[in-house]
Amino acid sequence: MITNVSLTTKEKNLLEDQKKDEEICVLKYSNYANMASDPELKNIFHTNMKQEEQHLNTVNQILSGQFSSMGSQSQNSAGSGSSSGSGSSSSSQSGSSSQSSSSSQSGSSSQQSQPSSSNLQSTNSFSASQSTDKDLCSDILMTEKFVSAAYNTAIFEFRDPAIRDALNHIQKEEQKHGESVYKYMESKGMYNPMS
């Protein structure tokens, strides 16, 4: 159901800020999905980008004075979080196939020095790509913390309960994005919550 809304100057200014934040989120997730080396992480970034596009559409709707209910959007987003882990098997398969091909080449003791140096090189390149993925994750977590906090402020400033609910829904999804990245980092040994 589409509702006409009138916004105060303060509400408009807050939404303009959220619009800029959402545009940055869409851009970052899109770029980071292309830059990430792990297919599982690419999938997480791509899934989160799609939801950020929905957030941007919602903010633009409210700014235009035409606001529609978010009931169907919340059902769609509830199912999308489970797809973030689908890339893990392909990354582990590609790692094991490269290991088996290098180990099959090391038949004699005189040839073992070459494979171990190539294994060392592939380990170093994996560490470099994992480090890049860690940097992307750290940056997007910092972004999500900022955006979630900005929504928290905005929610308290709106008079219309339906808009407050919509912004609250977006904020919860921003927190879920952060959680998906956090869980990925923890599973890959990139983040230790105990330290």
Image: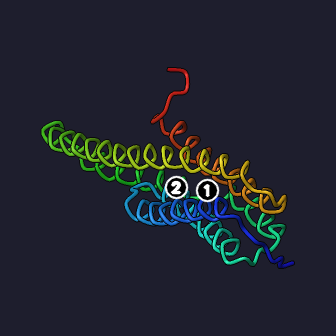
Asked whether disc 1 touches disc 2, contact meaning CB atoms under 8 Å apart, the reply is yes
Which secondary structure, mark 2? helix
User: Which disc, if any, is residue 192?
Assistant: none
Judge from the rendering whether residue 5 lies leftward or rightward of residue 177; answer left or right.
Answer: right
On the image, the x and y values in percent for residue 177 come to 61, 51
Residue 171 in percent (x, y) is at 68, 52
Q: Amino acid at mark 2?
A: Glu
Q: What residue is rendered at 15% in x and 38% in y? A: 113
Q: Is residue 155 left or right of residue 92?
A: right
The front one of 117 and 14 is 14
Please state which amino acid type lies under the numbered disc 1. Ser
Classify mark 1: helix, strand or loop: helix
Give the class, few, some or many, for how many residues have Cα within 10 Å of label 1's Cα (few <14, many ≥20). Answer: many
* Residue bearing the label numbered 1: 84
Q: Nearer the viewer, residue 101 or 50?
A: 50
Residue 40's disc number? 2
Near-viewer residue (102 or 55) = 55
